[in-house]
Image: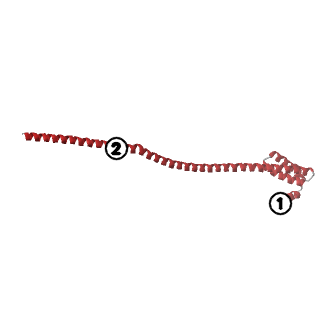
Amino acid sequence: MSDTLRTTIKTIAQTTENGIELINKVDSFYNSAWDKLILVGTVAFGVIGILVPFVIQWYQKKTLKISEELMKKELENQALTLKAELLDHININIKKEIKIFEEKIEKLNASTNAKAFHLQGNGQLANGYKAGALSDYIISADNYIICEDYNNLQTVLRLILEDCLPSLSLEEIEDLKYRMAVI
């Protein structure tokens, strides 16, 4: 019995040592696993919490630069388009204004010529040169029509009808027609 007791005690002692050793191994395993978990968690937090925002920020900066360049190009294109449209609009307006100005200058020139020939015709009529007066009055009437001065046109036509035509022969009028056609 003493051997069995010894064997039992040895077995119990071994089992206790094995149990303690087993408990130590389990504790060591969990401590190692916990340490690894903390290490992996820290690395994962470092990657996710620090590295990923830097990558996202880098990507956003890159896309922002690309968007900025595209926007600059689009703005330049729009500016060029608007500039071309504005120049076209200005050119059209300038052409219209120049045409109006040319018409006014033409009328002013016609008015000046009409009045000059009217005065010259009056002078020739006063000196008795009816053919010369008729020629000047005809040129004056033509210019009064261009400058739309109908009051003076009526005066000149009345002078032609009442003072010039009754005093001239058909030959003088034909001669005057020929000289006016050459001019």
Name the front one of labels 2 and 1.
2
Residue 157 located left or right of residue 62: right
Q: Residue at x 58, y 50 (%)?
A: 76
* In the foreground, 83 or 121: 83
Mark 2 — residue? 39
Quarter residue 131 falls in: bottom right
Describe the element under mark 2 as helix, strand or loop: helix
First in sequence: mark 2 or mark 1?
Answer: 2
Q: What x and y, as percent, mark residue 110? A: 80, 50
Which x, y percent locates residue 33? 29, 43
Q: Secondary structure at mark 1?
A: helix
- Image x and y of residue 120, in percent: 88, 51
Which residue in the protein does label 1 denote? 182
Kind of residue indicated by mark 2: Leu
**For residue 39, what is the image quadrant?**
top left
Q: Examine the rendering and report whether any part of residue 111 can be seen.
A: yes
Q: Residue at x 88, y 57 (%)?
A: 172
Would residue 93 appear left or right of 67 to someone viewing this image?
right
Q: Nearer the viewer, residue 110 or 30?
A: 30
The residue lying toward the viewer, choosing from 37 and 98, is: 37
76 lies left or right of 166: left
Residue 121: horizontal and vertical position, in percent?
88, 51
Tell me if residue 138 comes above or below residue 17 in the rendering. Answer: below
Disc ID at residue 117: none
Camera-side residue: 7 or 161? 7
